[in-house]
Image (spheres, helix red, strand yellow):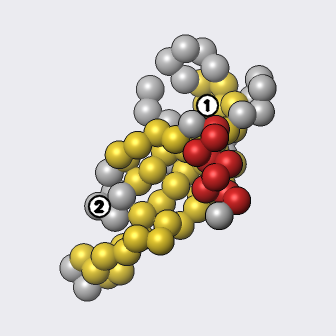
Amino acid sequence: MKPKLNTFEVQEGKLGKQFRLTCTHKGKESKWLSGVEKYDWYYIFKYIDNGTNFALYEDVYGKIVKKLNYKEVDELLCS
């Protein structure tokens, strides 16, 4: 199952773990596409059972290109 990026409702992954979107983080990369400045985005989720985070990275074209683990998310949020 692909996580929904537009809701803060509890979701359930393929392995049965529940998680929730907790915040979005605008990246530093931008590009002008069709006269509109587009940015890359990070969607940060938190597992309900143990409170660890993971994130999905979306490039300026709107494509999810990477899943970040909890250590990478901590580095992102502390930068």
Q: Earlier in the sequence, mark 2 or mark 1?
A: 1
Q: Which residue is mark 2?
A: 61
Q: Nearer the viewer, residue 1 or 29?
A: 29
Q: Secondary structure at mark 2?
A: loop
Q: Which residue is mark 1?
A: 11
* Residue at (46% x, 39% y) in the render: 67
* Residue at (58% x, 45% y) in the render: 72
Residue 16 locus on image (x, y percent):
60, 15
Residue 15 appears left or right of 48 = left
Amino acid type at mark 1: Gln
Q: Local crowd at mark 1 within 10 Å, few (<14), some, or many (≥20)?
A: some
Residue 25 appears left or right of 48 = left
Regarding residue 4, the answer to whether it shows in the image is no
Q: Tell me where residue 24 sits by quadrant.
A: bottom right
Q: Is residue 65 above or below residue 33?
A: above
Q: Tell me where residue 17 sits by quadrant.
A: top right
